[in-house]
């Protein structure tokens, strides 16, 4: 299941700046109006929407959320709220609200919180084994099997192949893979991604190596057909 962020605010000033910041960090972002929410929540493409709501201009954030949720009660998406310090005492936790951040926050904190929430949204249900041809990925056991035989992968190799396999045919840049698999605070460069891809292909073997495709001048994608 792919995940993207919908930006929404009672007063939309500054959303374009926030969108640019998140896009540069590797997130897929769309700016929504309140009227767009119901349609976005039931997106026919099956994307998992995380709603990032900027409540910094509101005196009554809980009331605004209640009103917003009323228009999409059946499919209200998980939310991460941005608010100013005085608003925290008026925040009412409830269904669909995953986390909040008190503005301005520490550098990188927003991106880190978004990755944590999106990781939970994209996590396969307990007991789910991802199967692509002869390849099996068991997230609960941290195991990968090829034609029934276990593959000896490092933790990051496992996280990388799991990330790509759960988003088949989606192209990711090296920077996006670094952000999503290694984290925003990773010091190394994009060559790290190339090295791990090369090792993964070698362990998959010549028949299955083509599952991980190189998209020239862009990055990599996982193909469901070897």
Image: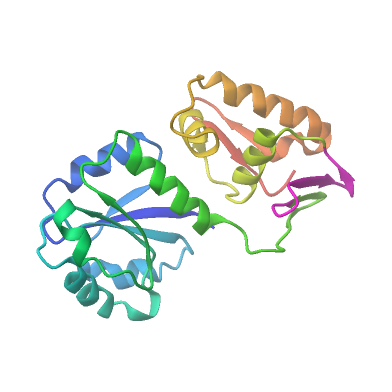
Picture residue at 63% right of the left edge, 64% below the top? 125
As drawn, 195 above or below 76:
above
Q: Quadrant of the N terminus?
A: bottom right
Q: Position of residue 85 (x, y in %)?
A: 18, 52
Q: Quadrant of the C terminus?
A: top right
* Residue at screen point 73% across, 31% down: 200
Viewer-proximal residue among 176 and 215 = 176
The residue depicted at 51 percent of the width and 31 percent of the height is 178
Q: Which residues are magenta?
A: 138-151
Residue 121 shown left or right of residue 15 in the figure: right
Q: As rendered, which of 49 and 44 lies closer to the eye?
A: 49
Residue 37 in view of the camera:
yes
The quadrant holding residue 209 is top right
Residue 73 lies in the magenta-colored region = no
In the rendered image, residue 147 lying in the magenta stretch gets the answer: yes
Find residue 43 and report its horizontal and vertical position in percent.
Answer: 41, 67
Q: Note whether 162 is above or below 213 in the view shown.
A: below
Does residue 155 sit above or below 186 in this rendering? Answer: below
Number of disc labels = 0
- Residue 213 placed where, x, y %? 64, 35
Left or right position of 88 against 119: left
Specify the quadrant of the image occupied by residue 32. bottom left
In the shown orientation, is residue 139 left or right of residue 205?
left
Q: Up-down: is 194 above or below 20? A: above
Residue at 68% x, 34% y is: 157
Q: Locate residue 19 relative to residue 126 in the image: left or right.
A: left
């Amino acid at each position: 299941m792919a995940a993207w962020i919908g930006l929404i605010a009672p007063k939309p000033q500054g959303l374009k700046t926030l969108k640019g910041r998140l896009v540069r960090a590797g997130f897929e972002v769309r700016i929504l109006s309140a009227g767009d929410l119901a349609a976005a929540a039931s997106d026919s493409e099956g994307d998992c929407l995380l709603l990032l709501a900027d409540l910094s201009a509101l005196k009554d954030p809980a009331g605004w959320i209640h009103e917003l949720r009323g228009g999409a009660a059946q499919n209200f998406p998980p939310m991460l709220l941005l608010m100013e310090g005085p608003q925290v005492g008026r925040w009412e936790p409830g269904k669909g609200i995953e986390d909040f951040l008190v503005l301005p926050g520490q550098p990188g904190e927003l991106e880190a919180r978004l990755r944590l929430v999106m990781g939970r949204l994209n996590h396969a249900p307990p007991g789910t084994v991802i199967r692509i041809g002869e390849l099996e990925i068991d997230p609960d056991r941290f195991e990968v099997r090829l034609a029934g035989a276990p593959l000896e992968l490092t933790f990051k190799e496992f996280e990388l192949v799991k990330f790509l396999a759960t988003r088949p045919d989606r192209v990711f840049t090296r920077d996006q893979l670094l952000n999503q698999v290694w984290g925003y605070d990773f010091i190394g460069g994009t060559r790290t991604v190339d090295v791990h891809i090369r090792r993964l292909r070698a362990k998959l073997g010549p028949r299955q190596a083509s599952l991980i495709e190189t998209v020239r001048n862009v990055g990599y994608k996982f193909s469901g057909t070897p």
